[in-house]
Amino acid sequence: MESEIQALYQQLLNAWNNRNAREMADLFTGDGEMIGFDGSQVISPDEIFSHLDPIFESHPTARYVSKIKKRPFS
């Protein structure tokens, strides 16, 4: 399960870094939610796509990298 979560997280970052709104939105479930940096909330892949597409088309966005650290269970 942990590797699937890490893979999904990497796909999300790759879609963002590639500025691909469709690819990013398609990673969400039908009732998936995304909260924008401004606090805006969108629900569902279609709404997420509609929110991200104009951002990617008209604004430069910073790239993200990831580093996953494993914590011991407490």
Image (spheres, rainbow, N blue to C red):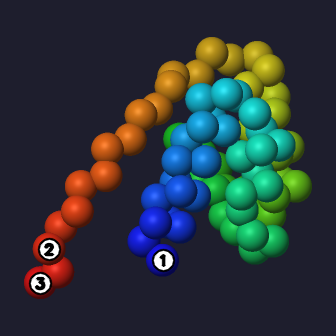
| Occupied quadrant, residue 47 | bottom right
Q: Are marks 2 and 1 in contact (CB under 8 Å)?
A: no
Q: Residue at x 81, y 33 (%)?
A: 53
Foreground pick, 64 / 11: 11
2 or 1: tag closer to the N-terminus: 1
Which x, y percent locates residue 54? 81, 28
Foreground pick, 36 / 23: 23
Locate residue 16 relative to residue 56 in the image: left or right. left
Question: What whole-number distance in Å separates the C-alpha atoms at marks 2 and 1?
Answer: 16 Å
Which numbered disc covers residue 74? 3
Q: Residue at x 64, y 56 (%)?
A: 34
The residue that mark 2 highlights is: 72
Foreground pick, 25 / 48: 25
Q: Are marks 2 and 3 in contact (CB under 8 Å)?
A: yes
Label 1 Cα crowd, 10 Å radius (few <14 / some 14-19 / many 20+): few
Which numbered disc covers residue 30? none
The C terminus is located in which quarter?
Answer: bottom left
| Occupied quadrant, residue 44 | bottom right
Q: Residue at x 52, y 48 (%)?
A: 10
Locate residue 74 relative to residue 40 in the image: left or right. left
The three-letter code of the residue at mark 1 reads Met
The three-letter code of the residue at mark 2 reads Pro
Q: Are marks 1 and 3 in contact (CB under 8 Å)?
A: no
Q: Is residue 4 visible?
A: yes
Which x, y percent locates residue 1? 48, 77
Secondary structure at badge 2 equals loop
Looking at the image, the residue that sits furthest to the bottom is 74
Secondary structure at badge 3 equals loop
Which numbered disc covers residue 1? 1
Label 3 Cα crowd, 10 Å radius (few <14 / some 14-19 / many 20+): few
